[in-house]
Amino acid sequence: MDPMSDPVTTIVAELVARLSTPVFSPFDIVMSDGGRISVPTADHCIVTRILRRIEVEHDDGSISILSPLHISRIETRSAA
């Protein structure tokens, strides 16, 4: 089975690629329930590949721990 046909692998790979680009563009992670998690800088998000877990730290000190199974899409934020 092609690993890129697995939706979890695809989401994790896309997040890693977005976080490692030289010029970061802020984005939102859209969850399957419609919720949105904002990622304003690459420093706000950690992807653990082995655990397949995404952690997003918010400016207020809280942390969202996400399962890639519940991520429906990743949207680049438009310039305000």
Image (tube, rainbow, N blue to C red):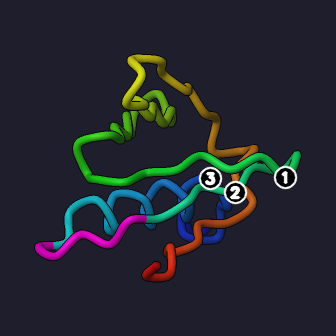
Q: Which labelled disc corresponds to residue 30? A: 2
Contact between marks 1 and 2 (CB within 8 A): the answer is yes
Q: Few, some or many C-alpha atoms within 10 Å of disc 2 (few <14, some 14-19, many ≥20)? A: some
Q: In this view, does 77 lie to the left or right of 1?
A: left
Q: Give the spatial CA distance, label 3 vs label 2.
A: 14 Å
Residue 19 is one of the magenta-drawn residues? no
Which of the two labelled residues, at mark 3 and mark 1, occupies the earlier sequence position?
A: 3
What residue is at 64 percent from the left and 70 percent from the top? 5
The extreme front residue here reads 80
Q: In this view, does 34 lie to the left or right of 78?
A: right
Q: Is residue 11 above or below residue 60?
A: below
- What are the residue bounds of the magenta stretch? 22-26
The extreme top residue here reads 61
The extreme bottom residue here reads 79
The picture places residue 60, in percent across and down from the top left corner, at 42, 22
Camera-side mark, 3 or 2? 2
Which of the two labelled residues, at mark 3 and mark 2, occupies the earlier sequence position?
A: 3
Q: Report which residue position mark 1 lands on.
A: 34
What residue is at 62 percent from the left and 52 percent from the top? 8
What residue is at 32 percent from the left and 72 percent from the top? 25
Q: Few, some or many C-alpha atoms within 10 Å of disc 3 (few <14, some 14-19, many ≥20)? A: some
The picture places residue 65, in percent across and down from the top left corner, at 55, 26
Q: Give the spatial CA distance, label 3 vs label 1.
A: 18 Å
Q: Report which residue position mark 3 lands on.
A: 8
Chief SS of the magenta region: loop
Q: Few, some or many C-alpha atoms within 10 Å of disc 1 (few <14, some 14-19, many ≥20)? A: few
Q: Give the spatial CA distance, label 1 vs label 2.
A: 6 Å
Question: Please, what is the three-letter code of the amino acid marked with disc 3?
Answer: Val
Contact between marks 3 and 1 (CB within 8 A): the answer is no
